Amino acid sequence: MADIKEILNTYRTVAVVGLSPDPGKPSHEVAAYLQRAGFRIIPVNPACAEILGERCYPELSEIPGEVEIVDVFRRSEFVPEIMEQAIAKGAKVFWMQEGIVNEPARRRGEEAGLDVVMDRCILKEHNRLSRG
């Protein structure tokens, strides 16, 4: 299993796949928290031009430069395709938020050398570790 503390202390650039522009949605709350905590967030949502003051990209492959963590807020059936994009992009970590589970995608990511976190909330984990 990936070392969550090491991940959150090492990497600072997070592509948030499925980031909603709606402040009431969990993805928006989590991304805003990450921004306040000093992470650079990169929104990935084909329906938006900008979210939380950051340029939005339709998919991972269109993001210029490096992506360290891919944080996924999409249903489990979309995860394998997003995993392939993350591998092609050279991401270091693939993070599936609470409620998102896809074992074949987890295995594929780990085989490709990514640290994979599944069914965990990055906000809750960061918050827990910063208090500890």
Image (cartoon, grey):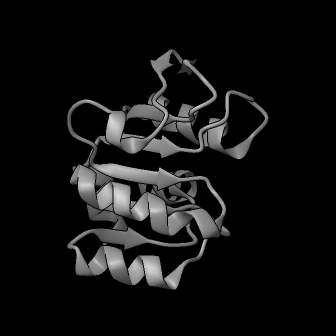
Q: Is residue 126 left or right of residue 7?
A: right
Along the viewing direction, whichever of 71 and 108 lies nearer the viewer: 108
**Depicted 19 relative to depicted 5: above or below:** above
Q: Locate the N terminus by quadrant.
A: bottom left
Q: Which residue appears at 58% of the width and 61% of the height?
A: 97
Q: Which residue appears at 50% of the width and 84% of the height?
A: 103
Q: x, y percentage for residue 21?
A: 68, 27
Residue 96 visible in the shown view: yes
Q: x, y percentage for residue 53?
A: 51, 15
Q: Which residue appears at 51% of the width and 55% of the height?
A: 122
Quarter location, residue 98: bottom right
Q: Is residue 43 left or right of residue 124?
A: left
**Depicted 34 relative to depicted 8: above or below:** above
Q: x, y percentage for residue 17?
A: 52, 46
Q: Is residue 114 left or right of residue 75?
A: left
Q: Is residue 72 left or right of residue 77?
A: left
